[in-house]
Image (spheres, rainbow, N blue to C red):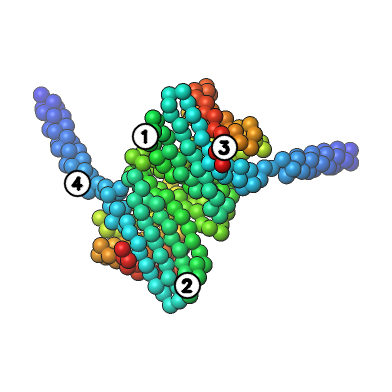
Amino acid sequence: MKTICLTALIAVFLLFCLNGVQAQYTETKLNQVELFKQWIGTWKSYNAKDTTAFWDAKSYGTGLEVNLKVVTKGKIVVEGKQLLGYDKRIDKYIQAEMVKGMDIEIVAIWFISKHKYVSIPYSDISSPEKVYIKWEGEFKSTDTILETTVVNNKPVKTWTFTRVK
Amino acid sequence: MKTFCLTTMIALCLSFCTTGIKAQTTQTKLNQVELMKQFTGTWKSETNDTTYIIEDKPYGDGHEVYMKNETKGKIIWEEKSLIGYDKKNDMLIEAMIEHNSPNITLFSIWFSSSNKYEEILLKDIPNPEKATEKDFFELKSPDLFIDTYMKNNKIVSVDTFKRVK
């Protein structure tokens, strides 16, 4: 009898804990589709070597259609297109990028808080903690994004994007 | 001495066989990027009241595709996609977003001969034979192709597309 009571008590306790965890998870689950709307617009990043990167995102359905270019001394040195769409299965966005002269690149991007996001190669999606390269970004305001390229867990480059329109 | 001769003979035989196999592989390897260029252009398929239009434009070594489905002159469905080469797998990848769906879909495309390609979901690539959805495209002439869509090994639809331009 004593054993049954103890088992029942543990079961009830576990049930309460589980409900608590579930409620917390539901509350904190981020709406990736809503958060991705922060990207819509034209963004520019300038570095000291006369190089400016432009990133122009328009909404298409709940995804984004992007034109990008990098200009050095008035000449386009990189030109590409991206399509970003939500993948319900993994609750993340997928970005397909075609840069002229290069192969297609597929990455997964997702917000980890209202203003911070992470991006990794899609091929590493099953083990995100083991990635060689990743990108960490933060919306510092509605008009400024800081994005850092991280290689082997070490930051190697940071771009600052400011909204043009 | 006898053993040495036998070993040398086996080694020579294997070497010839390997060279033969390699030469055969090199001869039959298809250039996926070049073959996909055959589908560049505007294509139309008409069935009863419904018209499918595909606009496939070259973009770098890849393609930018717009597809719509019209019934009695009204667009009922449309999608945009990017198709590019994935060197690692010697295949093409298509990333597609629909105007009214929240999800992005990734496909794998590969030519099995100079005028035929197959398309399945990228997630099914580890076991392509088990893919539930398959799309087969066959270029019958430079101005006509047939799209056969199969689900669970049963033909769902067969559409004939003619080149408009």
Marks 1 and 2, Cα distance to the nearest angstrom? 42 Å
Q: Is residue B78 visible?
A: yes
Question: Of callouts 3 and 1, which one flags the residue occurring earlier in the amino acid sequence?
Answer: 1
- Closest to the observer: B108 or B8? B108
Disc 4 crowd, CA 10 A, few/some/many (<14, 14-19, 20+)? few
Report the residue at 32% width, 56% height from top.
B40
Q: Secondary structure at mark 2?
A: loop
- Disc 2 and disc 3 in contact, CB within 8 angstroms: no
Q: Amino acid at mark 4?
A: Gln
Image vertical order of residue B8 relative to residue B76, above or below: above
- Which numbered disc, 4 or 3, marks the residue closer to the eye? 3
Marks 4 and 1, Cα distance to the nearest angstrom? 41 Å
Marks 4 and 2, Cα distance to the nearest angstrom? 47 Å
Q: Amino acid at mark 2?
A: Gly
Which of the 4 image quarters holds residue A102? top left
Question: Of callouts 4 and 2, which one flags the residue occurring earlier in the amino acid sequence?
Answer: 4
- Disc 4 and disc 3 in contact, CB within 8 angstroms: no
Furthest residue to the front? Answer: A74
Q: Position of residue B50 (x, y in %)?
A: 45, 73
Q: Would you name the residue on which mark 1 appears? A: A75
- Which numbered disc, 4 or 2, marks the residue closer to the eye? 2
Marks 4 and 3, Cα distance to the nearest angstrom? 51 Å
Chain letter belonging to callout 1: A
Q: Would you name the residue on which mark 4 appears? A: B27
Q: Would you name the residue on which mark 2 appears? A: B73
Chain letter belonging to callout 4: B
Q: Would you name the residue on which mark 3 appears? A: A163
